[in-house]
């Protein structure tokens, strides 16, 4: 059972291998609220991680607690508290959209006892995900983007305490993407839902996430708010301004203070713009640094084998590959 001190999600020393291919080596993190984005290169193990959290995949080792239970052994009541949007979900083709959501809402009803609000109203949900017009259509006739919206609706129908989404906006057009971001903010604000999502869209992560976890080489290699990561890794902000027709640029860690000083100064300021360090720059730098460390690790190990510092290294120049 959950204790008052246990975070909503606790992962410690998580290990997972497919055959001889170790994907998660030692993954540890706690999550206790807000919107958290799990980022990482292709094949880093994001889907594997979220599937383990959802109880869809067995881990090899480590502790995993989600809403007070081990997902591997959790019951139906626990499952009703967790909304899931898989990376691809291609069943229910013959169902009509509205019928499917009605049916799922009915399935959640027995688990709604004791909660202030039961499952979501189908009409409200259809409107929120922009599918009202296709409510009577069969699922198999939806476009890719409409299907993705339905996947999100399926994840939300039980009004979950935790919503886990694997690349939710892949295939959505820019307008649908923006609507989805607004929807996420609504479910967090209205229902206090904890959201964990994976994405390759760094602009999306920057807009929706309170916290970023970067997974690479089987471990969490960065953890922080988008701003904090961007500032720490990608460098200071840039203030650009025009005064008397002359453009100026200044790099600073305190763009607000610097801008205030400029505006209070004697020079008339015609234009003023602050460019912040971007999460995308920080992310690329984090992954690049990690790959460089991984490449250097075998060389360092060989250098240690060769003897004390200063002794010539036996490391051949071509040994710069990743450890595994
Ligand atoms: N069922 C499986 N059997 C064997 N290998 C698998 C299986 N599922 C995933 N893998 C491998 O595990 C690694 C991690 O895959 P995973 O899908 O978790 O990564 P990901 O970070 O979600 O990648 P992407 O960003 O490309 O979706 C990959 O090398 C993948 O090929």
Image (cartoon, rainbow, N blue to C red):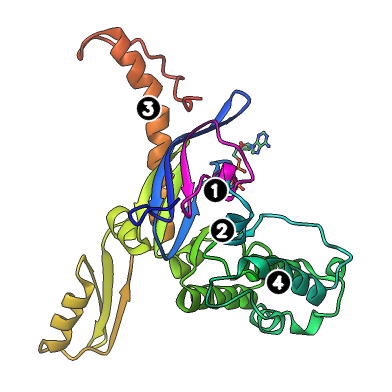
Label 3 element class: helix
Please provide the residue range marked out in magenta: 48-73
Q: Are the residues tagged 1 and 2 within 8 Å (C-beta)?
A: yes
Across and down, in percent, residue 7 comes to: 38, 54
* Left or right, residue 174 beside residue 122: left
Quadrant hosting residue 211: bottom left
Q: Are the residues tagged 1 and 3 within 8 Å (C-beta)?
A: no
Was residue 49 drawn as part of the magenta stretch in this picture? Answer: yes
Q: Earlier in the sequence, mark 2 or mark 3?
A: 2
Q: Is residue 42 visible?
A: no
Across and down, in percent, residue 170 comes to: 65, 61
Q: Are the residues tagged 2 and 3 within 8 Å (C-beta)?
A: no
What residue is shown with label 3? 296
What residue is shown with label 2? 164
What residue is shown with label 1? 53
Q: Earlier in the sequence, mark 1 or mark 3?
A: 1
Across and down, in percent, residue 247 comes to: 27, 79
The answer to whether the residue bearing label 2 lies less than 8 angstroms from the nearest atom of ligand 1 is: no
Label 1 element class: helix
Q: Quadrant of ligand 1?
A: top right
Q: In 3D space, how far apart are the residues under numbered discs 3 and 4 (Cα atoms)?
A: 53 Å
Which residue lies at the image location 56% right of the left edge and 58% below the top edge? 164
What residue is shown with label 4? 105
Q: Earlier in the sequence, mark 1 or mark 2?
A: 1
Q: In 3D space, how far apart are the residues under numbered discs 2 and 4 (Cα atoms)?
A: 18 Å
Quadrant hosting residue 109: bottom right
């Amino acid at each position: 059972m959950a204790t008052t001190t246990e975070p909503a999600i606790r992962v410690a020393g998580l290990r997972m291998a497919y055959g001889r291919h170790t994907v998660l080596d030692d993954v540890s993190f706690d999550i206790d609220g807000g919107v958290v984005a799990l980022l990482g290169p292709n094949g880093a193990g994001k889907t594997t991680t979220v599937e383990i959290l959802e109880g869809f995949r067995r881990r090899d080792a480590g502790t995993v607690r989600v809403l007070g239970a081990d997902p591997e052994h959790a019951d139906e009541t626990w499952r009703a508290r967790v909304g899931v949007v898989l990376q691809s979900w291609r069943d229910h083709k013959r169902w009509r959209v509205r019928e499917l959501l009605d049916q799922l809402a009915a399935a959640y009803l027995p688990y709604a006892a004791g909660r202030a609000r039961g499952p979501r109203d189908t009409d409200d949900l259809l409107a929120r995900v922009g599918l009202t017009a296709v409510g009577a259509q069969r699922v198999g006739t939806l476009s890719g983007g409409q299907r993705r919206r339905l996947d999100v609706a399926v994840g939300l129908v039980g009004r979950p305490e935790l919503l886990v989404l694997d690349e939710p906006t892949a295939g959505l057009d820019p307008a649908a993407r923006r609507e989805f971001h607004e929807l996420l903010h609504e479910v967090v604000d209205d229902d206090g839902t904890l959201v964990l999502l994976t994405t390759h869209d760094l602009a999306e992560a920057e807009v929706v996430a309170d916290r970023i976890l970067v997974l690479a080489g089987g471990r969490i290699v960065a953890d922080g708010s988008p701003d904090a990561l961007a500032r720490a890794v990608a460098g200071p902000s840039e203030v650009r301004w025009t005064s008397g027709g002359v453009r100026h640029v200044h790099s600073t860690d305190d763009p607000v203070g610097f801008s205030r000083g400029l505006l209070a100064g004697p020079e008339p300021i015609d234009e003023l713009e602050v460019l912040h360090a971007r999460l995308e720059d920080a992310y690329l730098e984090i992954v690049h640094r990690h790959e460089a460390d991984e490449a250097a690790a075998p060389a360092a190990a060989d250098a240690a084998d060769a003897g004390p510092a200063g002794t010539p290294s036996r490391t051949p120049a071509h040994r710069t590959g990743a450890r595994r």
